[in-house]
């Protein structure tokens, strides 16, 4: 019997880690598995998901040739400040007041290049060596970011050579990660990448170890935020490119499973709902680069709308019985009760649903007051806020301390969630249904309604919120801004029939279907067909769509080169190719830029692990009117965008 070529897709989401085994020829999902995401060590959850999916007796481990991995690790590490210490050396530029590179140590020295890639000043080697000496005992890696290095990286390359000779530490160069202009954003991107190096390396080591222990010898690929793959070797070098890899995997998985080319994907997960567009088979890419927290980067990533609306979103009613869902994430009562069997008893005794639990982590970075609160909760899990107040009487600002510990991942809080409602409705029964039912009963009693009325009210509100967020994404994409205020929000809810008893009826029609990914989508998305006059597609295996996308995509690299004329009608070719070319005719310059850009991306794709590589380049000419003394339009500059795409190659153990 011929050996099949199977792929194992893995996605570490905010709540669950999903696994799927896919036949790479027929693209059929043969097996799927799940495990809870383990924040203290993501590799543990990955291993549990692998074990779950490998229970499929029809799938031979020896047939698995590819493993595709999408992960929240980069995003979460940036948001929580995890990672190694970084020294940043800026060459030829001075930061504006208030600029933060994100590095632990900064130095700015003379050198750099100009807009025509010409050297503005020699690299100040004395200042460079002084900066290296000052930083080398304090940091784990270096970043070098030079002015206009995307056009001429000579100073970055020279500085990196000196750093490696003096320290032996890893060096990240700004021009390696992006070909876009903007040295501040390029510097932030490189610093975040350097900070992530040890974090991603440790995670990938754990994944490789887990696969080896399970007898899987396969090519490992890592999903990028733009919807494409790269080799595990490149992921170790460029971990920052995995920002938003989870939502990107969702989009590409939705494309594969739904067989649609133009749609809006709605991925309802445990922590959030992610919404994105696919146009004629291609995801919309963020023009400015991915933003994570307050860090603006130059990482190429899909244009995604993310909102704190998911299975673990905290559900709180008001006095009139209306529900506020999220954005805070809590531990569902049904889930917490399995790990802590005393929960139902505590709920019955106190009438509370909010209890605090410790997360096993090192406490070295905690203040004395934070340690006091953390140690109390650790000794008394399932404690209320009032019990913390009494147990840590010297911590007068205990509310703020508890919130800070929760935000930093040292404490978790239980609460009523969408997951609990789904358990009571009978959609899921994996965890403790009775704990969930008790929580819903509390709400029904407080709002003077029945449990059935409570369930129906919540169901309608969750459907409304999903439709509302789809409309927000459309408004933002097509108007360029997101209005706010009660009037706009009222109209937005009216477009999905979300205002009960309103005299205003609006009709909505979408030009493309909604494709649902994630376990809750069959519950909350079908009602939108009638409300929004849209076709809703819930594909088979939607519950592991991210994992499917993680292994069934292509390897791709993109670069942009520019052709600029100067005052003497000489045309410059500018790009991350190492040297600048000048030409007397624009056609010659474009031809040269095209050739160099195509060669550059082909090599990048090959290094990222691709075979059967195809290259395409597009030319975009930017014109301006020359004025009174010049006839017609003139060329301001020309963009040459080259993209190389290929299939993942089997290059490991096969």
Image (spheres, rainbow, N blue to C red):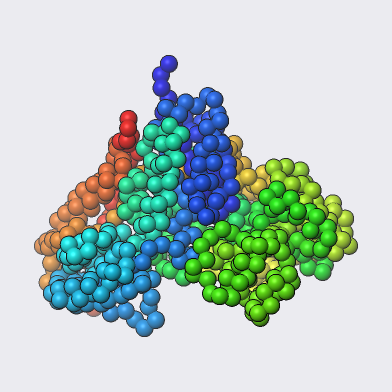
Q: Residue at x 24, y 47 (%)?
A: 603
What is the x, y in percent for residue 156?
Answer: 21, 65
Q: Residue at x 26, y 61 (%)?
A: 169
Q: Quadrant of the C terminus?
A: top left
Q: Residue at x 46, y 70 (%)?
A: 294
- The image quadrant that residue 580 belongs to is bottom left
Q: Is residue 81 above or below residue 277?
A: below
Which residue is more in the foreground, 634 or 205? 205
| Count of numbered labels shown in the rendering | 0
Is 122 placed left or right of 253 in the picture? left
Is 483 placed left or right of 570 in the picture? right
Is 323 placed left or right of 79 in the picture? right
Which residue is more in the foreground, 128 or 512? 128
Q: Quadrant of the N terminus?
A: top left
Spot the residue most to the top: 1
- The image quadrant that residue 393 belongs to is bottom right
What is the x, y in percent for residue 453?
Answer: 84, 55
Q: Residue at x 47, y 40 (%)?
A: 9
What is the x, y in percent for residue 108?
Answer: 25, 77
Instruction: Mark yes or no: residue 433 visible.
Output: yes
Instruction: Mark yes or no: residue 575 visible.
Output: no
- The image quadrant that residue 645 belongs to is top left
């Amino acid at each position: 019997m011929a050996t099949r070529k199977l792929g194992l897709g893995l996605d570490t989401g905010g709540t669950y880690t999903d696994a799927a085994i896919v036949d790479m020829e027929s693209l059929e999902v043969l097996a799927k598995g799940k495990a809870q995401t383990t924040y203290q060590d993501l590799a543990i959850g990955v291993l549990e998901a692998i074990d779950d999916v490998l229970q499929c007796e029809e799938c031979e481990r020896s047939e698995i040739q590819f493993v595709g991995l999408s992960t929240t690790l980069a995003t979460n590490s940036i948001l929580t400040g995890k990672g190694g210490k970084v020294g940043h050396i800026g060459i030829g530029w001075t930061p504006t007041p208030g600029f933060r590179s994100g590095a632990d140590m900064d130095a700015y020295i003379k050198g750099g290049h100009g807009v025509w890639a010409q050297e503005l000043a020699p690299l100040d080697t004395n200042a460079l060596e002084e900066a290296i000496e000052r930083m080398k005992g304090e940091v784990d890696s270096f970043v070098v970011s030079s002015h206009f290095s995307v056009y001429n990286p000579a100073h970055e390359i020279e500085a990196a050579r000196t750093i490696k000779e003096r320290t032996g530490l890893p060096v990240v160069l700004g021009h390696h990660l992006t070909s876009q202009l903007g040295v501040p954003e390029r510097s932030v991107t490189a610093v975040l990448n350097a900070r992530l190096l040890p974090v991603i390396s440790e995670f990938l080591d754990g994944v490789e170890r887990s696969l080896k222990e399970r007898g899987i010898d396969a090519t490992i690929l890592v999903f990028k935020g733009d919807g494409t793959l790269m080799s595990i070797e490149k992921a170790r070098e460029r971990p920052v490119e995995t920002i938003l890899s989870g939502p990107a995997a969702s989009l590409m998985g939705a494309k594969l499973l739904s067989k649609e080319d133009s749609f809006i994907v709605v991925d309802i997960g445990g922590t959030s709902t992610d919404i994105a567009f696919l146009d004629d088979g291609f995801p919309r890419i963020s023009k400015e680069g991915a933003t994570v927290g307050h860090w603006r980067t130059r990482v190429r990533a899909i244009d995604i709308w993310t909102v704190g609306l998911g299975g673990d979103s905290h559900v709180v009613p008001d006095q009139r019985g209306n529900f506020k869902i999220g954005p805070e994430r809590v531990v569902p009562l049904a889930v917490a009760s399995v790990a802590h069997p005393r929960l139902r008893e505590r709920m019955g005794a106190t009438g509370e649903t909010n209890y605090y639990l410790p997360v096993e982590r090192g406490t070295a970075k905690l203040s004395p007051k934070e340690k006091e609160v953390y140690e109390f909760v650790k000794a008394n899990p399932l404690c209320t806020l009032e019990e913390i107040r009494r147990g840590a009487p010297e911590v007068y600002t205990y509310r703020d301390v508890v919130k800070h510990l929760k935000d930093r991942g040292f404490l978790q809080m239980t609460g009523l969630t969408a997951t609990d409602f789904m358990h009571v409705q009978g959609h899921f029964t994996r965890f403790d249904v009775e704990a969930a039912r008790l929580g819903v009963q509390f709400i029904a009693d407080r709002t003077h309604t029945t449990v059935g009325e409570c369930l129906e009210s919540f169901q309608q509100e969750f459907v409304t919120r999903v439709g509302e967020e789809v409309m927000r994404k459309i408004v933002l994409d097509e108007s360029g801004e997101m209005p706010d205020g009660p009037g706009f929000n009222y109209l937005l809810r009216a477009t999905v029939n979300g205002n009960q008893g309103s005299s205003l009826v609006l009709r909505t029609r979408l030009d493309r279907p909604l494709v649902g990914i994630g376990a809750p989508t069959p519950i909350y998305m079908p009602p939108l067909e009638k409300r929004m006059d849209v076709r809703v597609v819930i594909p088979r295996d939607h519950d592991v769509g991210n994992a499917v996308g993680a292994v069934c995509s292509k390897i791709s690299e993109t670069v942009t080169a520019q052709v600029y004329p100067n005052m003497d009608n000489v045309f410059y070719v500018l790009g991350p190719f190492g040297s600048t070319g000048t030409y007397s005719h624009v056609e010659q310059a474009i031809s040269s830029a095209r050739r160099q850009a195509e060669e550059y991306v082909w090599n990048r794709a090959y290094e990222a692990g691709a075979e059967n590589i195809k290259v395409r380049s597009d030319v975009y000419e930017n014109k301006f009117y020359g004025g009174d003394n010049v006839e017609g339009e003139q060329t301001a500059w020309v963009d040459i965008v080259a993209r190389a795409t290929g299939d993942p190659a089997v290059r490991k153990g096969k």
